[in-house]
Image (cartoon, grey):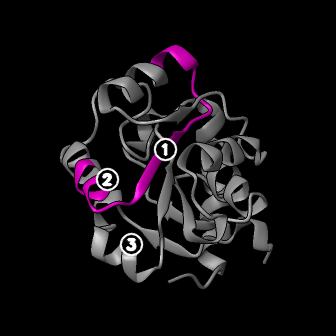
Amino acid sequence: MCRLLKPDLRIDSVLELAPERLRGLNLEALLLDVDCTLKPYRSETLEPGVEDWLNEVRASGIGVCLVSNGRAARIRRLAEALRLPVVCQACKPLPFGCWAALRRTGADRRRTAMVGDQLFADVMAGRLAGLICILVRPIHPEQEPWFTRMKRPLERLLLARMRTP
């Protein structure tokens, strides 16, 4: 299986990443995808519990930066409301957005995780940037754009063949 597509960890929701678990994984920073990871695609509203989770993670001393391929204006509004650093139009799966986010957090790449819902964008970008990769089950995938929905069957096939914790 191609290492570029294999996540280190698969979870149902970012809410599973309590600060204690993150410390147990020896992480000092999270780079977070936005659409379908923290909120439904193009929604202005985070999933229930996500804002409290973000506050808890930051209060524990773990750095957080949003990394999104989404349009700058929409993603920046969210980042400003949450008081988080952000890299918009990150061009994932290329690693450049992750590298920019690493500079913003000041974290060591070996102790930083890219957290997102897509193998071919988030996990691949994280791998190319030398990060730990955590794959999250997408939030409301039925609301995704066609170009994301068409990749999901191949993702499911690949994930079924992977042995990931």
Q: Which residue is mark 3?
A: 22
Q: Which residue is mark 2?
A: 58
Residue 123: in magenta span: no
* Disc 1: CA contacts within 10 A as few (<14), some (14-19) or many (>=20): many
Residue 109 position in % (x across, y down): 65, 64
- Residue 45: image quadrant is top left
- Residue 41: image quadrant is top left
Q: Label 3, secondary structure: give it.
A: helix
Under mark 3, the amino acid is: Leu
Foreground residue among 51 and 102: 102
Under mark 2, the amino acid is: Arg
Q: Label 1, secondary structure: give it.
A: strand
Q: Is residue 11 positioned above or below 75 on the image?
A: below
Residue 23 position in % (x across, y down): 38, 76
How far is the residue under mark 2 from the one under mark 1? 10 Å
Q: Label 2, secondary structure: give it.
A: helix
How far is the residue under mark 3 from the one under mark 2? 12 Å
